[in-house]
Image (cartoon, helix red, strand yellow):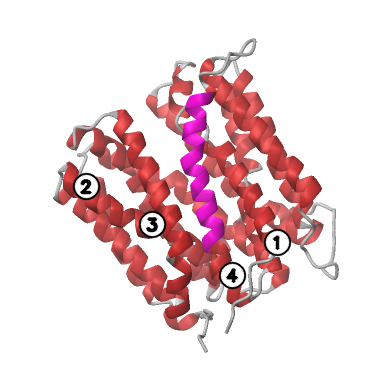
Amino acid sequence: MIEKRLPGQFWIIAAIAFINSISFTIIIPLLYPYAKQFSLTDFQASLLITAYAISQFLGTPVLGRFSDRMGRKPILIISLLGTVLANILASISNTALLLYTARILDGLTGGNNSVATAVISDITPPEQRAKAFGIFAAIIRLGFVVGPVLSYLAQQLPTLPGISPLGMSFVVGAAIALFAVIITIFFLPETLPESAPKSFQLSWQDFEFSKIAKSATKPKLGKLFILTFLSGVTFTIFTFAFQPFFLNILNRNSGELAIAFSVVGMLGFISQVLALEPLRSRFNLVNILAMTLFIRGVSFLLMPTFPTITAFAIILTLFSLVNAFPMPLIQSVLSLNSNQQEQGEILGINASYLSISNAFGPFISGLLVSLGYKLPLWLTGILTIATAWFAFSLKSEFQCYKKVNK
């Protein structure tokens, strides 16, 4: 049986997401040194990450619900414009308060990826969604490779009045996000079915964040939200602990650290494009999810057990090839087990669980790093394997499409 190609609208939303991911990742390498320009302590600088994650946790489900009621396109435009304004504000900030305000604004309007995934759900049939989400996540991951490179180049540009060289990266990030806005306005059609009820009114229900916590008790879907949180926490424990381990245990430098991040991103992109679809055609999605989490956990355990650069390179390669799979697989299972009218809200809630895990993970990792550089990796390895077991236990509960070869 010949499989249908993904619709042209998919590539438009993928291009928008790619551009947006660059505008986001362009500030990752500079946020900490930029905070130091405001004489912030290390702890205060870390709160910039926490403020963004918590704000995104609060804002994403509201944007997701609005996209179900008002349409995907207008909410995506609003979200992208929030990134533009936040980056401009950060670039011209002259106080720490303004910088915190910029990060909070960016978080509150940071639901663009969840709205984009809702667009993909609108335009792809169930049997194509795993493939679509896999390619979509791979394209976003490629943005994580390009962004840090552009950040360095942006700092070499002539500065504008009142903006430092580091601040120029925020300016470039704003310009890139604005480009995504233009593409959305002129090239992305509305994908929410015309028969869906439209509403432009606010209600208190749109701000009842207790629903996010209660969503964990939803039949079936609540377990996937919990899985997203556990996967996110264990991974972000690693991402924080990875850096001091690489620098102090492996005795490498910051330039080599940047290369390591680039390698992880590039291998993740390649594996998502080339490997996810063949695996999807042969195995149940939940089985793939559980196995990739298991391999991720084993990788975390092996890194501190064999602390040499040669062993690390081998383990990092294995980790990179599977690390990109969990979130697109979880999104696929969620999409296949919810109806179209609620997918924006469901995917938004799931993104909120991921956002709050991004606030918890680094905090936990920071406490563990103070006890030793290897301890966080061992602990998150054990926790990730436990998360893989939890994922495998959900196999019988969810509808997961496979391509049947004829």
Amino acid type shown at disc 3: Asn
Q: In this view, does 129 lie to the left or right of 291?
A: right
Tag 3–tag 1 contact (CB < 8 Å): no
Tags 2 and 4 touching, CB below 8 Å: no
Amino acid type, mark 1: Gly
Residue appearing at x 35%, y 53% in the figure:
320
Q: In which quarter of the image is residue 189?
A: bottom right
Other residues around mark 2 within 10 Å, as few (<14) / some (14–19) / many (≥20): some
For residue 129, the mark is: 4
Q: Does the magenta stretch include residue 140?
A: yes
- Tag 2, which secondary structure? helix
As shown in the figure, which amino acid type bears the numbered disc 4?
Answer: Arg
Residue beneath label 1, please?
8
* Marks 4 and 1 in Cβ contact (< 8 Å): no
Residue 61, can we see it?
no
| Labels 2 and 1 touching (C-beta < 8 A) | no
What is the span of residues highlighted in magenta in the rendered image?
Answer: 134-153
Q: Nearer the viewer, residue 19 or 249?
A: 19
Q: Splitting the image into 4 quarters, where does residue 91 fall?
A: top right
- Distance between mark 2 and mark 3 Cα atoms: 15 Å
Kindly state the secondary structure of the residue where label 4 is placed: helix
Dominant secondary structure (helix, strand or loop) of the stretch shown in magenta: helix
**Of callouts 3 and 1, which one flags the residue occurring earlier in the amino acid sequence?**
1
Quadrant where the N terminus sits is bottom right
Label at residue 312: 2
Q: In this view, does 187 lie to the left or right of 309?
A: right
What is the C-alpha distance between the residues marked 3 and 1?
28 Å
- Crowding near the residue tagged with mark 4, few <14, some 14–19, many ≥20 C-alpha atoms within 10 Å: many
**Distance in Å between CA atoms under marks 3 and 4:** 19 Å
Residue 329 visible (yes or no):
yes
